[in-house]
Amino acid sequence: MKKSSNPQLNKWIDEMVALVQPDQVIWIDGSEEQRQDLYNQACDSGEMIRLNQEKLPGCYLHRTAVNDVARVEDRTFICTREKENAGPTNNWMDPKEAYAKLGKLFEGSMKGRTMYVIPYCMGPIGSPFSKVGIELTDSIYVVENMIIMTRVGDAVLEMLGDSNDFVRGLHSKAQLDAENRYICHFPEDNTIWSVNSGYGGNVLLGKKCFALRIASYQGKNEGWMAEHMLILGIENPQGEVKYVAAAFPSACGKTNLAMLIPPEIYKKQGYKVWTVGDDIAWIRVGEDGRLWAVNPENGFFGVAPGTNAKSNPNALATTRQNTIFTNVVHNLEDNTVWWEGLDKNPPKKAIDWKGRPWDPDTATEKGAHPNSRFTASASGCPCLSKEFANPKGVPLSAIIFGGRRAKTAPLVYQARDWEHGVFVGSVMASETTAAAAGAVGVVRRDPMAMLPFCGYHMGDYFQHWLEMGKKVGDKAPKIFNVNWFRTDDEGHFIWPGFGDNMRVLMWILARCDGKADAVETPIGYEPKPEDINVEGLDGVTTQTVADLLTVDKALWREDAANIREFYGKFGDRLPKELMAQLDRLDANLQE
Ligand code: GTP
Ligand code: SPV
Ligand code: MN
């Protein structure tokens, strides 16, 4: 059974085996043979369904338990020894109590089951910036997802060698008991324990648990940043590529922006967009003193509904091979998949995400869960950047924040400088989505889109942002805020979004190059409406853009009051620079 020559790793695995008591232990070696063998087993047991291999080669369908379809923020804990260090925005549990409580739930939870040992690497294998994790799990679904989302297998063990520097992740589906579902992080022990769930964000421990919650803590201590950001490159007709990173909350458009196809007016000039990442960025100061971003993942765990040949042809193409679909509609007519917003032809013979026969003509419920997802390999993405696996990453020209705001936030504005930009990120607000369990459409503060993912005190996190800015000085990326989601009185989105977001990116890049003007407003710099190109848009004019850029002072005053209340939570751990920024906003709004 023992396959590693790393004594610390072996010792930990022995302890975990004694706790969960599996019938056998299998090490994931990264071979295609083992991967196929596990798919076969999962299809035999019914855990996965093999889809039409002519239309969707290498593709599978999985349905989770109906009460286990999204991240569970109220059951997610940061277990620091001092409560204060988890901060006011995280749930906290004493590590001793958490180990004891979850230990009971883990005890014997793998009896009669196989435990898989997944050695995985976040970032390209061998890069000094990459980090190793080991996930122990009793779920083949988790194994197959981790194989797509990360780099796994023997090569990772080789990279780890005898080092003790790896994140210890333990996951068991246990009984999938929602009442005893816990996702606990022990940043001071490099450890993650997740029990009683089988849903992506709760169980693919390399993703949100490690690459954001644990890594944000590591980054603070080691002088780098782990952020909930997409990374994309925009190539101009001369072949020069500029990179931007953007932080939007869950289900607010990162995958879509990362895979954007430029509108015709830009395409014909020769502009191209390249995807480096769609969810997570690890950001460091490079040798040239600029900020460089790496995508630590190796695949995309994307929202299925709304993905179609018009909104996101690149994402759709990415999912046509070697993809696991979770909680979408099973199209029995040709053994493929369907979801709301794929096309206007829902299958007549189908099974819904709950596993029940589903007829689009009589159905009263959606066929696919709003948070149904695809797990697709980056290698299948037609617009994958050639820098995707560059261990140095890509240099950032701009950082963009954004969320879903029906009113208040304008289409785009620029922060006056880094410090103001940190303020803009820290006061981000967005309507909640189906990516997390709980109410949908409620506006909440979600600083830097990291509210559910920051592994330490959010006040210290803001301070870390300020310090990173000091390190890069005038080489810092310019900071912007966008909102694709303003609505009219009937609740329809005004801005066309998707590929047309390129029009806003073009102003952002022009600002970075010092080639575009701006208008100073109480909240920051805005474009002149005529500087957002609307050529070729149907029904959207420069006047529409002007409307999307309005700053309603009354609404903003309400927002500022709400920000002050939010800031109050952080007490003396809120950097004074941010309070000064808020005072300045208040003053600007009184004028
Ligand atoms: P996570 O994977 O949860 O982190 O989500 P994400 O930020 O990658 O969001 P994604 O790109 O998957 O988009 C989520 C939803 O927002 C989908 O239903 C999209 O169709 C919709 N969406 C994305 N971009 C736009 C846009 O520009 N305008 C509008 N109106 N909707 C958008
Ligand atoms: C998100 O919710 O931001 C996601 C999906 O990217 S999950 O991996 O479930 O967190
Ligand atoms: Mn995400």
Image (spheres, rainbow, N blue to C red):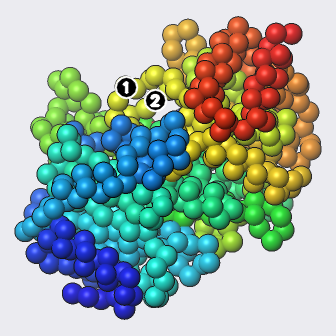
Q: Which residue is mark 1?
A: 439
Q: Which label number is shown at residue 383?
A: none
Asked whether, in this view, residue 7 is left or right of residue 249, the answer is left
What is the x, y in percent for residue 528?
85, 25
> Which residue position holds label 2?
432
> How far across and how far down the image is residue 297, in percent?
50, 63
Residue at coordinates 25% horizontally, 79% vertically from top-left? 14
Residue at point 79%, 13% (across, down): 589
Element at label 2? loop
Q: Is residue 97 left or right of residue 359?
A: right
Of the two numbered discs 2 and 1 on the same chain, state the one appearing first in sequence: 2
Residue sitting farthest toward the left: 112
Q: Is residue 338 visible?
A: no
Q: Is residue 303 above or below residue 481?
A: below
Marks 2/1 in contact by CB < 8 Å: the verdict is: yes
**510 sits to left or right of 273:** right
Tag 1, which secondary structure?
loop
Between 87 and 261, the residue placed more toward the observer is: 87
> Which residue type does callout 2 highlight?
Thr
| Alpha carbon distance from label 2 to label 1 | 7 Å
Q: Quadrant of residue 495?
A: top right
Q: Nearer the viewer, residue 490 or 590?
A: 590
Residue 396, percent across and down? 75, 56
Bin the neighbour count of mark 1 within 10 Å (Cα to Cα): few under 14, some 14-19, many 20 and up: few
Residue ID at (20%, 40%): 179
For the N terminus, which image quadrant?
Answer: bottom left
Quadrant in which the C terminus appears: top right
Q: Say what amino acid the circle numbered 1 marks.
A: Ala
